[in-house]
Structure formats: C-alpha cells, structure tokens
Image (cartoon, grey):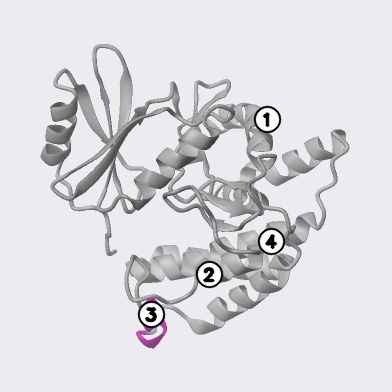
C-alpha cells in the first residue's frame, strides 16, 4: 500500500514542539490523518494537539472555522499556527476524553445520544449561501450541492489526486463501478436543498472525542464545507452503519416536528459519494483489500437506493 503522509520524523516534530513549549512532555504521535502528522503533548498548564502539514491551506482553514464557529460548537481552541523550514503547524487545545471509536459499542451507543444534539447544532448552522470548500479565508465559491460533489472529481495536475484518471488506464480503478456510482450520485444530488449549511466533511467516530458521556470535541475540520448537512450524516453512517445514526436523527427530527425533504435521496447521494470517492482513494493507494471492500459497499448502495 502506498503512503502519502507528510515526511516528518518524530524527532523533527518534538524539536518544533519543544521550541514553542520547552516544558513539553509525553509527546506522542496520533494516527489520525492520511496526509498530515498529528501529535499530542502536555505542558505544566495544558494539554495540546499539534498538526503538521506540508502547506498552510488546511491549517488556515481550520483556524478560520474555529474563529467563526467555535463559540457555539465543540471545536478545540486554536492557540498557535506557524511555519518552520517549510513545515506548517497548528497547536490546539486537546479536548478531554478519547475518540468515540475507541469505546465499547455499548458506550458508543450511549454517547451517540448526546451526539444527536451536537450534530443538530452543526446541521442548523446556516452559512452565507454559497456552496463548496471553505477556503483559508473562510469563503466558499460554488452555487449548488451537485456542483460541489462533481467538483471533487475534476482532474487536476497537482495534489493528492493529481492526474487521477490514469488509474483507469493502469486498470487499478475500474470504470464500470465508478461510473455507476458517479451517475447515481449526481442524479440523487439534485434533491439537495438550495440553502447551504456548515458541513464538517470528515464526520466519523475517530474525529469525535468524548469523556464517555458527552461529546467533548469535534476535531479535524480541514475538510469543512458549506452545503447539504446530510453529507456528515452519510459520512458517519458509511463507516459505522451498525450505529443507525440516520435513523436516530430521523426519529428526533420527527419528534421535533421537523421534516427533512427527500431524506433518503439526499442520504444516498452522499453515501454514494463516499463509496465512489473511496474507490478512487484505495486505487490511488493500491490498497486492493480496501478497494474490494468499498466496491462491494458501492454495489450494495446501488441495490438499496
């Protein structure tokens, strides 16, 4: 399997951390991101998380999201951003607890009751009306959710997915399942609302911290967008279907007298995005086992919708 992680040694990270915090102890790497290096550490007065990236874009974006929404959402405080020798980094407050995914299933189910409240706040956070990636200045530029989903698959020369369509030519990425998933995704995306909402973009149990009772932090906002809030609901359900989170939210909204138009169509549009993009991701990594798992999941979604 190919790896595209930032080339940063533990010694490099420790040196940067200790330059900022000479009293830092318990410096430990966290395997959270594929394209970033993340560490946690402590000082005499606080606990921190350090994110390291090869560029400033995602760090500037995370800082913008915190400053704009941190007062109402459980986003860890961003304390410091900087760059040293081409390595961009951000120090943020470490939320109490641990990732929800690390708890027993029974405890996860209990925590998810509280997560419904947190997710409701995110889903109710309206934006300036635009759709798409939130850029480092805090703005989005597109005009509809279908345009956003389609934009993910525009081939560019640079970046993680640079020249990704060569994966078809190399027969790593199969065109038939990809095209079927993409076509149905775009068809269902037409049901998305014309109003845009805050979207976390990488909403799974590994990016949610809890003390075992409540959600204490939603982390890793580097993929934050403006658009259909069902994208986050689909993201959590895609990776943790056994938790039945969409069903939980639908029942809560029904009790509150809130009708979510085209619930199934929007949920499946975004589930199909996860599956179709997942094919490309695992093909890019040449991760055959992951690729086959996602392909099976894609065909199940196409059969169920």
Q: Residue 304 location, x and y as percent?
A: 73, 65
Q: Residues within 10 Å of mark 4 (few under 14, many from 20)?
A: many
Decide which of 179, 191 is in the foreground and name it. Answer: 191
Q: Which residues are magenta?
A: 164-170
Q: Earlier in the sequence, mark 1 or mark 4?
A: 1
- How far is disc 4 from disc 3 in space, using C-alphas? 25 Å
The dot on residue 151 is: 2
Q: Could you say which quadrant of the image residue 102 lies in?
A: top left
Q: Nearer the viewer, mark 3 or mark 1?
A: 1
The dot on residue 36 is: none
Q: Earlier in the sequence, mark 2 or mark 3?
A: 2
Question: At numbered mark 3, what does the secondary structure look like: helix, strand or loop?
Answer: helix
Q: Could you say which quadrant of the image residue 150 lies in?
A: bottom right
Classify residue 298 as left or right of residue 82. Answer: right
- How far is disc 3 from disc 1 in space, using C-alphas? 41 Å
Q: Residue 61 location, x and y as percent?
A: 42, 46
Q: Nearer the viewer, mark 4 or mark 2?
A: 2
The dot on residue 167 is: 3
Q: Earlier in the sequence, mark 2 or mark 1?
A: 1
- Give the labeled residue for mark 4: 268
Q: Nearer the viewer, mark 2 or mark 3?
A: 2
């Amino acid at each position: 399997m190919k790896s595209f992680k930032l080339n940063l040694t533990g010694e490099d990270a420790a040196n940067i951390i200790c330059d900022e915090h000479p009293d830092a102890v318990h410096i430990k790497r966290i395997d959270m991101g594929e394209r970033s290096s993340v560490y946690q550490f402590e000082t005499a007065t606080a606990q921190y998380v350090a994110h390291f990236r090869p560029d400033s874009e995602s760090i500037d974006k995370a800082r913008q999201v915190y400053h704009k929404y941190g007062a109402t959402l459980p986003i860890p405080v961003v304390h410091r951003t900087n760059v040293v020798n081409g390595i961009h980094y951000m120090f943020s407050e470490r939320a109490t607890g641990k990732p929800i995914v690390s708890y027993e299933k029974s405890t996860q189910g209990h925590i998810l009751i509280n997560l419904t409240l947190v997710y409701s706040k995110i889903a109710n956070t309206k934006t300036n009306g635009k759709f798409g990636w939130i850029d480092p200045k805090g703005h989005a530029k597109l005009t509809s959710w279908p345009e956003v989903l389609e934009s993910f698959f525009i081939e560019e020369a640079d970046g993680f997915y640079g020249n990704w369509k060569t994966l078809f030519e190399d027969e790593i990425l199969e065109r038939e399942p990809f095209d079927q998933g993409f076509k149905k995704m775009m068809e269902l995306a037409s049901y998305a609302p014309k109003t845009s909402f805050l979207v976390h973009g990488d909403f799974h149990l590994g990016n949610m911290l809890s003390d075992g009772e409540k959600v204490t932090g939603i982390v890793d906002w580097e993929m934050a967008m403006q658009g259909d809030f069902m994208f986050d609901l689909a993201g959590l359900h895609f990776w943790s279907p056994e938790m039945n989170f969409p069903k939980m939210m639908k029942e809560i909204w029904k009790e509150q007298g809130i009708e979510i138009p085209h619930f199934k169509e929007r949920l499946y549009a975004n589930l199909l995005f996860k599956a179709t993009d997942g094919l490309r991701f695992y093909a890019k990594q040449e991760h055959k086992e992951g690729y086959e798992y996602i392909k099976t999941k894609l065909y199940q979604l196409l059969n169920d919708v």
